[in-house]
């Protein structure tokens, strides 16, 4: 996921995306614990996507407060 794609979304869409990414992260951790995870790199991608979404969400909220 690119930052430009994330920036194009609204605050509500970002919150929904964050919930979905957190669910996926939990499922990936569970698969890793039960040794059913095939792509370990996906954990890293999801973690970075979560950080990306949180960063853009914070920026948008901060911009709304100052406007």
Image: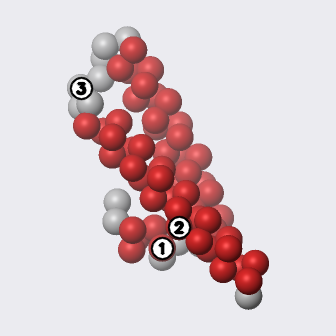
Q: Which residue is drawn at 50% across and 30% down?
A: 26
Between the residue at mark 1 and the residue at mark 3, the CA separation in whole angstroms equals 30 Å
Please tell me whether residue 32 is drawn above or below residue 23 in the rendered image.
above
Residue matched to label 2: 56
Q: Residue at x 46, y 37 (%)?
A: 24
Q: Where residue 64 sits in the image (x, y, percent)?
A: 71, 79
Instruction: Work out whether mark 3 precedes mark 2 in sequence or the reverse, and give the earlier one.
Output: 3
Disc 2 on helix, strand or loop? helix
Labels 1 & 2 near each other (Cβ < 8 A): yes
Q: Which of 44 and 27 is in front in this view?
A: 44
Please tell me whether residue 56 is drawn above or below residue 50 in the rendered image.
below
Q: Which residue is drawn at 62% across and 74% down?
A: 60
Disc 3 on helix, strand or loop? loop
The reply to whether residue 13 is visible in this rendering is no
Q: Crowdedness of circle 2 by 10 Å Cα count: few (<14), some, many (20+)?
A: some
Disc 1 on helix, strand or loop? helix
Residue matched to label 3: 38
Disc assigned to residue 7? 1
In front: mark 1 or mark 2? Answer: 2
Labels 3 & 2 near each other (Cβ < 8 A): no
Q: Crowdedness of circle 1 by 10 Å Cα count: few (<14), some, many (20+)?
A: some
Instruction: Work out whether mark 1 precedes mark 2 in sequence or the reverse, and give the earlier one.
Output: 1
**In which quadrant of the rendered image does the C terminus lie?**
bottom right
Q: Where residue 17 sits in the image (x, y, percent)?
A: 54, 54
Q: Nearer the viewer, residue 13 or 40?
A: 40
Between the residue at mark 3 and the residue at mark 2, the CA separation in whole angstroms equals 30 Å
Q: Where residue 10 sits in the image (x, y, percent)?
A: 59, 72
The reply to whether residue 36 is visible in this rendering is yes
Q: Where residue 50 sits in the image (x, y, percent)?
A: 48, 50
């Amino acid at each position: 996921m690119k930052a430009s794609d994330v920036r194009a979304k609204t605050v509500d869409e970002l919150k929904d995306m964050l919930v979905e990414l957190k669910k996926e992260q939990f499922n990936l951790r569970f698969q890793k614990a039960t040794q059913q995870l095939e792509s370990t790199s996906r954990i890293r991608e999801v973690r970075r996507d979560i950080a990306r979404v949180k960063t853009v969400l914070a920026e948008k909220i901060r911009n709304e407060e100052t406007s």
